[in-house]
Amino acid sequence: MKESTGWRHMSSAPRDGSRILVTVRSSEQGPAEVDVAFWARADQYGMEGWRANDSYPGHMIEYADPELKCWMALPSANAAASTVADMPTPWEGSEEELHGSGI
């Protein structure tokens, strides 16, 4: 996957099983947050869709499309760049900023 910086619309997210960062929308359960997710085909664990399983061993989280606002490529593991990678903050801008004006 070609790396670039910045948050992008979920419609352009890779659906090849590679892990990406996603902004999970805020809800009554809590504020917006960033998670590591991947696209999974339907299997014995669930239907086709976005999943995350890095938070709790053995616990699979399934995200519905409307729950995810945007995505970003995982930062590279380049030791020369930085010793500590900071987790990006969730996208807090408006939907129009993310989608573009269409003009």
Image (cartoon, rainbow, N blue to C red):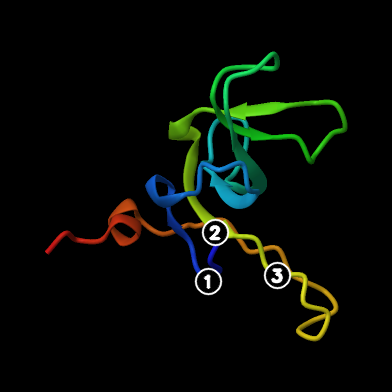
| Most distant residue in the left direction | 103
Question: Mark 1, mark 3: which one is toward the viewer?
Answer: 3
Q: Quadrant of residue 63?
A: top right
Q: Residues within 10 Å of mark 1 (few under 14, many from 20)?
A: few
Q: CA distance from mark 2 to mark 3?
A: 12 Å
What residue sits 57% from the left and 26% below the top?
A: 41
Query: Is the Cβ of the residue at disc 1 closer than 8 Å to that at disc 2?
Result: yes
Regarding mark 1 in the picture, which secondary structure is present there?
Answer: loop
What residue sits 80% from the left and 39% below the top?
A: 55
**Which residue bears the numbered disc 3?**
76
Q: Where is residue 94 drawn, in percent x and y?
A: 35, 55
Q: Quadrant of the N terminus?
A: bottom right
What residue sits 50% from the left and 48% below the top?
A: 14
Camera-nearest residue between 52 and 16: 16
Query: Is the Cβ of the residue at disc 1 closer than 8 Å to that at disc 3?
Result: no
Q: Is residue 98 above or below residue 10?
A: below
Question: Mark 2, mark 3: which one is toward the viewer?
Answer: 3
Q: Which mark is residue 5?
A: 1
Camera-nearest residue between 89 and 37: 37
Q: Which mark is residue 72?
A: 2
Residue type highlighted by circle 2: Met
Residue type highlighted by circle 3: Ser
The reply, left or right, for residue 80 in relation to residue 29 is right
Q: Where is residue 68 drawn, in percent x and y?
A: 50, 40
Q: Residues within 10 Å of mark 2 (few under 14, many from 20)?
A: many
Query: Is the Cβ of the residue at disc 2 closer than 8 Å to that at disc 3?
Result: no
Disc with the residue nearer the chain's start (1 vs 3) = 1
The reply, left or right, for residue 37 in relation to residue 27 is right
Q: Residues within 10 Å of mark 3 (few under 14, many from 20)?
A: few
